[in-house]
Amino acid sequence: MTQQVRFPQAMQSLLAAAMLLLPLALSAATKTYTTDTDFDLGALDGVNHDAPNNNQLQLNRVGTTFPVLWIANAGEDTVSKIDTNNNKEVARYRTGFGPSGQAGFVSHLGNAYAGPAPSRTAVDIQGNAYVLNRHFDGKSAVLIKILAEGGIDRNGNGSIDTSNDLNNNGIIAGAEILPMADTNGNGYIDAAELQDERIAWARRVPDGIAAPLRNGALGRSLCIAPDGNLWVGLFNDGTYYKVASSDGSTVSGPHSIGLTPYGCLVDRNGILWSADLGSRLGRLDTSNPSSVATFSFSMSNYGIALGNDRVYLATYSGANGRPFARFNPATNSFDTPAGASHGALGVAVDGSGNVIAGNYSSGGVTKFAPDGAVLWQRPAQGGTGEVRGVAVDANNDVWLIHRTTANISKYRGSDGTPLGVFPIGNEPYTYSDAAGFAARNITNNTGTWTAVFDGGAAGTAWGKVNWADLVPTGASIGVQIRSADSVAGLSLLAYQPVGKNVQFAASGRYIQIQARLNANTDGDSPVLYDLTVNSNNLSCDIDQNGAIDISDVNAIRSSIGQTPAAGDARDANGDNKITINDVRLCVMKCSKPQCAP
């Protein structure tokens, strides 16, 4: 944190004299972020510097997520990316071959139970999306990863070819969706067939030379574990597979769970909770997949949500007349809290622990307090109808997915005010964690701060990032960087993790720094007090702590008259002498005003 430092008159004179040397040498590129104003130069996502904890970053108390929804369109084999701040569809990606005329294309508009028929989506803590094709065509389930930014320049043209809203009308159609053809006729998506370069990979589950094809098994469950890897449930087999998020390869499985997987979520302890298209809830320990259990209750469940140390199951036939039942893992018992009476397919929990259930048949929605009391209830907005899924966005507003009318509707989270109905693809069929809310607030309680700093010159060599923090046991702060000669070029590059005050190699005029704060399993947040980024100019940094301050200046001043070795950090002007000129140059390179430590 910033300290107030007083300097003797001699030091003030030295500072003034150093100004005269400004034309002689450029200051190293360095920036320290420590005040609220500094941190506001970056993007705060799930973190804050709110009072009383100003001038530091910590995780939000009220959960949030990315301002994006990922909705699978089962009738046309695509997935839509929705900007939830501007209420617009900004991209649409194919999960099956198309459009008409492309090899392998199968038309089944209006039928969510034919062909690849994508349904479940999941979003990781970086914002990357995963969509699972159920495959009612008898083939194995296929899992697809779509990158939140950047891509893979497969055609080598120097840009990322991807779906965009070319006419800015908020609807993706026609040429705004890139085609995909089954060029080798094997019925599955191969890497060479991916035309949209935001799609990282498409792999069947299970996959691998030794893995048998699980034809007709139906991929109906998808969730993310704390380690970032995926768990895919095959309905007809009653099994789960662990899949690597990096490349889609099958890590382990099959792991039998004793029910028909129909949606899943993983809690912060690594316990996978699986809905069943019946009256059971499954429990699987992802660190020990042979440890499984099932629990029964009188209901017909569907969607699943986590929150308040409970598991929530939407009940489309009503559980004792209620839209959801909740399960307490501490007592292995179910209950149905008082409240509205209607069936539900989709259920979600917001950042304050409130529970939202869609009205399956009428198209409306009800919001409940954690104790089950009704906070508000709203009817369907015009032209909607059946609610297949419910999602909570970054502002804790509520979205409903309407399968039969090919649209989605939005309600203000605080009071249920209707905020509009928006078109989407054919037969939208998502009721899983479409915004990554559970992944970011339950599975991994996390948030990020991301900033871009201009080094002032192309090819700037970057050297170290240093930071001050307070990290409770089990929590963590991780920092990663990427650099390019243009801001636009940053998003095309992968981040590289860096250690605290550890030398690294990167170059480019601009450096992007991302600090990720992760709470421990008790919900305790780490604290980031300050962060300093430095170019790879080691002169003047005598103690090699990633910052130049009064201690470095004093060390050089006390060495005046000595003969430096080659590369000595005290020889700032490189004249093979340590003189008052080196002191003056290093004063100009100080990381903070007045060379404060």
Image (spheres, rainbow, N blue to C red):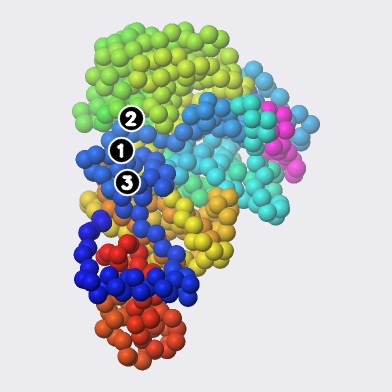
* Residue 40, picture quadrant: top left
Confirm or deny contact between disc 1 and disc 2 (CB under 8 A): yes
Q: Which region shows up in magenta? A: 173-191
Q: Nearer the viewer, mark 1 or mark 2?
A: 1
Q: Position of residue 484 (x, y in %)?
A: 55, 58
Say what secondary structure mark 2 lies in.
Answer: loop
Q: Which mark is residue 97?
A: none
Residue linked to disc 1:
60
**In this view of the protein, can residue 235 be seen by the observer?**
no
Q: Position of residue 475 (x, y in %)?
A: 27, 49
Image quadrant in which the C terminus is located:
bottom left
Q: Amino acid at mark 1?
A: Asn
Q: Is residue 307 magenta?
A: no
Q: Label 3 to label 1, Cα distance in Å?
A: 15 Å
Residue linked to disc 2:
351
Q: Which mark is residue 36?
A: 3
Left or right of 53: which side holds 94?
Answer: right
Q: What secondary structure is the magenta-colored segment mainly?
A: loop
